[in-house]
Image: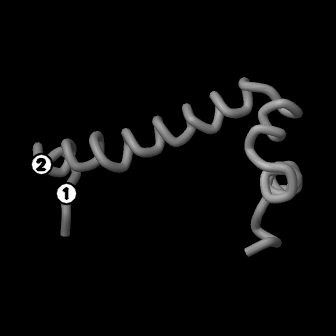
Amino acid sequence: MRGLTPKFMQEWISIIKKDGLKSFVKQKGWKIVALIFAYYLVRDTILYIIIPYLIINNIIECS
């Protein structure tokens, strides 16, 4: 799985594992934390709200 992770994320993960989340925020700033939060917010909205809504209203055909 390590080969599938982008290099910049490998650096972030190593900082979090080595020094902790508090150190990561000090080094990279709150913008990165906000970006990660926004990514998961959009992803989960699509997966758990929009797709089921479209399936229920027969907009997407299920086989």
Image location of residue 5, percent across then percent down: 77, 62
Q: Quadrant of residue 33?
A: top right
Q: Amino acid at mark 1?
A: Glu
Which of the image's four quarters has the C terminus?
Answer: bottom left
Mark number displayed over residue 43: none
**Left or right relative to 29: residue 47:** left
Circle 2 residues within 10 Å: few <14, some 14–19, many ≥20: few
Circle 1 residues within 10 Å: few <14, some 14–19, many ≥20: few
Q: Nearer the viewer, residue 36 or 29?
A: 29
Looking at the rendered structure, the number of numbered marks drawn on it comes to 2
Q: Quadrant of residue 54?
A: top left
Q: Which residue is mark 1?
A: 61
Residues at badges 1 and 2 in contact (C-beta under 8 Å)?
Answer: no
Q: Secondary structure at mark 1?
A: loop
Which of the image's four quarters has the N terminus?
Answer: bottom right
Q: Amino acid at mark 2?
A: Ile
Which comes before the other along the chain, label 1 or label 2?
2
With respect to residue 41, does 48 lie above or below?
below
**Left or right relative to 34: residue 46:** left
Q: Secondary structure at mark 2?
A: helix
* Cα gap from disc 1 to disc 2, whole angstroms: 10 Å
Q: Nearer the viewer, residue 34 or 46?
A: 34
Image location of residue 4, percent across then percent down: 76, 68
Q: What is the basis of the colouring in this image?
A: one colour
Q: Which residue is mark 2?
A: 56
With respect to residue 45, does 61 lie above or below?
below
